[in-house]
Amino acid sequence: MHKKLMIVDDDPDILISIRELFEAEGFEVYTVPCGKDCIDELEHGFKGVILMDIMMPHMDGWTTIRQIVAKGLNKDNIITMVSAKDECDWKFDDLKKYIRNYITKPFDNQRLLQTVKSYYSS
């Protein structure tokens, strides 16, 4: 299976560092700075793992996931939240079933890599 990863984050340093980490491991990496661009990529056929930041301008990660689900774009995609917030805000309990994992920033690169790789081996 071809390993694809989309990083959705408004921080360019995060986009670059995660891209470099995963490209070195043979992943095809897409980087997008906002939820709207994430949805555009999904509408153009992206299938793979999505690392979704929560706090972004215009459309936060939760709103983006709601739109992904409403449009039926979550099929064959694995969504993992990546956030500077220590705890997942489970007032969004209705979205739990669409999120595979919740990783806090700053994260350990090797642990992030192993987590994403595990999605492709299961």
Image (spheres, grey):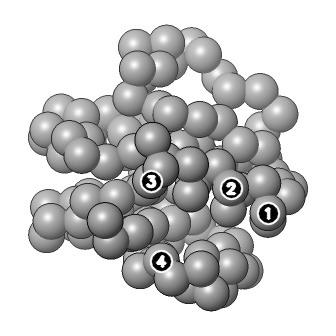
Q: Is there CB contact under 8 Å for labels 4 and 1? A: no
Q: Is residue 37 above or below residue 104?
A: below
Quadrant of res 90: top right
- Crowd rating for badge 2 (residues with CA inside 10 Å; few <14, some 14–19, many 20+): few
**Which residue is the site of mark 1?**
110
Q: Secondary structure at mark 1?
A: helix
Q: Is residue 23 above or below residue 77?
A: below
For badge 4, the amino acid type reads Phe
Q: Is there CB contact under 8 Å for labels 1 and 2? A: yes
User: Is 85 displayed left or right of 56 in the figure?
Assistant: right
Q: CA distance from mark 3 to mark 2?
A: 10 Å
Q: CA distance from mark 1 to mark 2?
A: 6 Å
Q: Is there CB contact under 8 Å for labels 3 and 2? A: no
Q: Secondary structure at mark 3?
A: helix
**Which residue is the site of mark 3?**
120
**Which residue is the site of mark 2?**
114
Q: CA distance from mark 4 to mark 2?
A: 13 Å
Q: Position of residue 101 (x, y in %)?
A: 59, 35
Q: Position of residue 36 (x, y in %)?
A: 32, 61
